[in-house]
Image: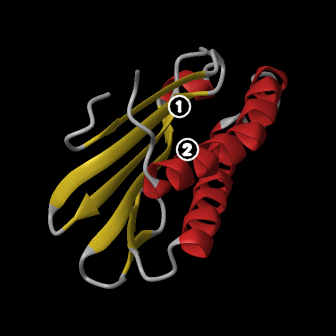
Amino acid sequence: MAAPRSANLNVMIRAAEIAARNLIRDFGEVENLQVSTKGPGDFVSAADRRAEEIIFEELKKARPGFGFLMEESGVVEGDGENRFIIDPLDGTTNFLHGIPHWAISIALETNGEIVAGVIYDPIKDDMFHAEKNEGA
């Protein structure tokens, strides 16, 4: 029987699931944009930023003292002990080309060590997570 998930891991999973809703919708629009004159690049960049903002807001609400290292927005200082590391759209090139192999990645770093991680593939609804001393 698996060990119960920590509160931090539950928060990370929830943030990934919430951000996934918009990314799935946006992914469905990418094919339509392939023929547009502007092209899908700007659209995908905007989807990436929106997903990051959703994840940031969800995590900040749950853990207001934690810092952040984000792919799009950079560093947000926190308590100096804990920070979330976020890649809201890992596999942007695949997303851009309509290839359904991309994920949301979130890690929790405590005192310079990664202690928890979540990788969520919304297309397949596959959630992978691990915590230090708890396995994957």
Residue 124 in picture, x, y percent from top left = 63, 15
Q: Nearer the viewer, residue 28 or 109?
A: 109
Q: Nearer the viewer, mark 1 or mark 2?
A: 2
Residue 94 in picture, x, y percent from top left = 53, 22
Residue ID for mark 1: 120
Q: Nearer the viewer, residue 10 or 49?
A: 10
Residue ID for mark 2: 13
The span from disc 1 to disc 2 (Cα, nearest Å) is 8 Å
Instruction: Assess whether mark 2 and mark 1 are in contact (beta carbons under 8 angstroms).
Output: yes
Q: 62 above or below 121? A: below
Q: Nearer the viewer, residue 92 or 87?
A: 87
* Amino acid type, mark 2: Ile
| Image quarter (top left, top right, bottom left or bottom right) of the C terminus | top left
**What residue lies at 61% left-to-right and 20% top-to-bottom?**
97
Chain-order first, disc 1 or disc 2:
2
**What residue lies at 80% left-to-right and 24% top-to-bottom?**
28
Kindly state the secondary structure of the residue where label 1 is placed: strand
Q: Give the colour scheme of this rendering.
A: secondary structure
Kindly state the secondary structure of the residue where label 2 is placed: helix
Task: Using the rendered image of the protein, determine whether residue 38 is visible from the camera's viewpoint.
Answer: no
Classify residue 85 by image quadrant. bottom left
Q: 5 above or below 96? A: below
